[in-house]
Amino acid sequence: MDETNEIIEVKEINRLAYESDLWSRGLTAIAGVDEVGRGCLFGDVVAAAVILPVGLVLEEVNDSKQLSEKKRDRLYDQIREEAIAWSVARVEASVIDEINIRQASRLAMKQAVEGLTVRPEHLLVDAESVDLSIGQTAIIKGDSLSQSIAAASIIAKVTRDRLCAEVWDKLYPGYGIAGHKGYATKVHREALLELGPTPHHRRSFLGNLFAEQQVLF
């Protein structure tokens, strides 16, 4: 039997495709915008906005969830050094409960953009719209497809992870916040059922958890 070798071509993602198109139109202040913590039971939703120099290539930048903690920390420092401007904003759990997580995420993104020291000419946003009168492009899976959005995702995630490990875990020992970062892991759910929610828990996210507990017991 003849053997045939099949060559599978892996197409490399051009994470500057969106930026390059805007640069070619004379726009230079392009801000990537992203948020983290949307699906957590605990803590703030954190957003970041980052404007990188025209033509800058950051080879290792990718969706923050695809990177190791060590690499994220290193890129966090590099992005802050290289960026023309960067900004972080947080919206706390009580506001999330009041206006819902999607609106809280959009508010955090808006505040992050407003916190930039350079006014952006266009926004590249991860699958959302920002309530500002600035031209913008919403990109599905933008943190994997755009260097600017990926940079924002790294800044936002490192910021939130450090809050979990260095602030919130010490403020509320026993919940394992440093480990699970506020997500609904088994450890977190069990701690919630034993200790009850803290002021930083999103009450609107906990209804199903406690309803399930009542059914089980």
Image (cartoon, rainbow, N blue to C red):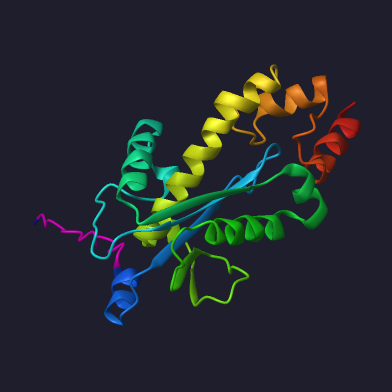
Residue 152, percent from left and from top: 45, 52
Above or below residue 21? Residue 113 is: above
The main secondary structure of the magenta stretch is loop
The answer to whether residue 3 of the structure is visible from this angle is yes
Q: Which residues are magenta?
A: 3-16
Above or below residue 204? Residue 188 is: above
Toward the left, the furthest residue is 2
Above or below residue 13? Residue 122 is: below
Q: Quadrant of residue 120?
A: bottom left
Residue 171 falls inside the magenta stretch:
no
The answer to whether residue 179 of the structure is visible from this angle is no
Quarter of the image where the C terminus is located? top right
Residue 114, percent from left and from top: 56, 61
Residue 74, percent from left and from top: 33, 36
Above or below residue 158? Residue 152 is: below
Q: Quadrant of residue 111?
A: bottom right
